[in-house]
Image (cartoon, grey):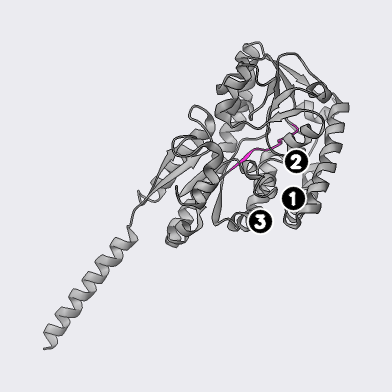
């Protein structure tokens, strides 16, 4: 009797062990929809993330990336993930400012932090906590999706160095920079990336910008216009974000949730490194193709900075949450200034030090 009972218990334990093992090795096949077309570096960012996830989960999570239009149009990515048309999304958060202006604070802020400073705020500061609070309202979980650095500027047919020269022009741009220019008399058209070239080529647009030199170069704007108004005051960092449907996220075991977070952090740093190198290389390519970079006058930059401050003050009065996010960013900027100022003056790039009055050769 005892032997029979022992045999039954042994069989039950074996079945349980096999069941647990099978559950632990459950595979997940996900769809990821993005706002970007193929052929630009940000599409490669999504592919890199998907490949990293598959490798570190040993195939438990497999993510197939669908570019803009393959399943849903670019500007429907957010709702597609909310409604589980796809498990994941990949986008620049500023596209969702119609849902909440605070999304732009996690995408690009005019006259804001640079890519490393913003990443530090997101990872070591309050950034990710606040991002989770915002995305959580919509049933989504955010993950860092790469930061490409400062945007280049606006392509124009003629060399322009005053922001007033854009007044009355049809310009493609997005985010808070778009609203600021609109308030200054510019006709703004917020087209998705895949539609810009044709509109620019056909004269629907007088001027266009999309992103950093590295991201924008493959789009071919240099074939249409040979001048760029710099610097990219409107987006001093460009942060992309992955999103996961909250119910899908909650169904994952903790180890796989952690794997996604690790892949996200790796992708963030990978994108910063390849983008900074790619930005520098792309500027050389532009110059070889006859593109000229026309720096905005100090007067224009000061005017834009003042207008930006007034614009953001108005937004903050309308949203307590946005006010909280921008407060957090400003507190971090003040904190980091203690170190940034102390370590300045010994840069490998004398131009920056000369401009700051901290280089005395």
Q: Residue at x 78, y 29 (%)?
A: 352
Q: Residues within 10 Å of mark 3 (few under 14, many from 20)?
A: some
Distance CA(mark 1)–CA(mark 3): 11 Å
Badge 3 or badge 2: first in the primary sequence: 2
Image quarter in which the N terminus is found: bottom left
Give residue 17's position: percent from left, percent from top.
26, 68
Badge 1 or badge 3: first in the primary sequence: 3
Residue holding disc 2: 112
Q: Which residues are magenta?
A: 233-240
Give residue 2's position: percent from left, percent from top.
14, 88
Query: Would you say residue 286 is visible in this rendering?
Result: yes
Q: Is residue 262 above or below residue 225?
A: below
Q: For the residue labelled by badge 1, is the local secondary structure a helix, a strand or a loop? A: helix
Give residue 162's position: percent from left, percent from top.
83, 22
Q: Residue at x 63, y 20 (%)?
A: 200
Q: Does the magenta-highlighted stretch encompass residue 234? A: yes
Q: Quick check: marks 3 and 2 in contact, CB under 8 Å? A: no
């Amino acid at each position: 009797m005892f032997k029979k009972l022992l045999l039954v218990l042994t069989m039950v334990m074996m079945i349980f062990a096999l069941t647990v093992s099978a559950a632990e090795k459950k595979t997940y096949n996900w769809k990821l929809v993005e706002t970007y077309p193929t052929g630009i570096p940000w599409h490669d960012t999504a592919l890199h993330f998907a490949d990293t996830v598959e490798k570190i989960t040993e195939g438990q999570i497999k993510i197939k990336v669908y570019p803009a239009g393959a399943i849903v149009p670019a500007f429907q990515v957010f709702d597609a993930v909310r409604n589980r048309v796809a498990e994941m999304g990949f986008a620049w958060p500023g596209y969702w400012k119609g849902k909440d202006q605070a999304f732009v604070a996690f995408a690009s802020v005019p006259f804001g932090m640079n890519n490393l400073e913003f990443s530090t705020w997101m990872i070591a500061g309050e950034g990710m906590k606040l991002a989770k609070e915002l995305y959580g309202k919509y049933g989504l979980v955010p993950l860092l999706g790469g930061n490409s650095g400062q945007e280049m500027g606006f392509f124009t047919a003629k060399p322009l160095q005053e922001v007033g020269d854009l007044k009355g022009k049809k310009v493609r741009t997005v985010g808070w920079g778009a609203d600021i220019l609109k308030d200054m008399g510019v006709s703004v058209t917020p087209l998705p990336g895949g539609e810009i070239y044709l509109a620019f080529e056909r004269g629907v647009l007088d001027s266009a910008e999309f992103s950093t030199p590295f991201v924008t170069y493959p789009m071919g704007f240099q074939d249409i216009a040979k001048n760029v108004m710099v610097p990219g005051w409107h987006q001093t960092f460009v942060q992309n974000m992955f999103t996961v449907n909250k119910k899908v996220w909650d169904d994952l075991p903790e180890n796989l949730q952690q794997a996604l977070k690790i892949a996200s952090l790796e992708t963030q740093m990978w994108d910063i490194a390849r983008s900074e190198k790619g930005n520098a290389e792309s500027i050389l390519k532009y110059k070889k193709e006859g593109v000229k970079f026309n720096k905005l006058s100090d007067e224009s930059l000061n005017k834009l900075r003042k207008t930006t401050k007034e614009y953001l003050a108005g937004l903050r009065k309308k949203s307590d949450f946005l006010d909280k996010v921008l407060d957090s960013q400003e507190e971090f900027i003040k904190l980091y200034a203690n170190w940034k100022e102390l370590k300045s003056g010994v840069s490998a790039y004398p131009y920056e030090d000369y401009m700051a009055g901290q280089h005395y050769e």
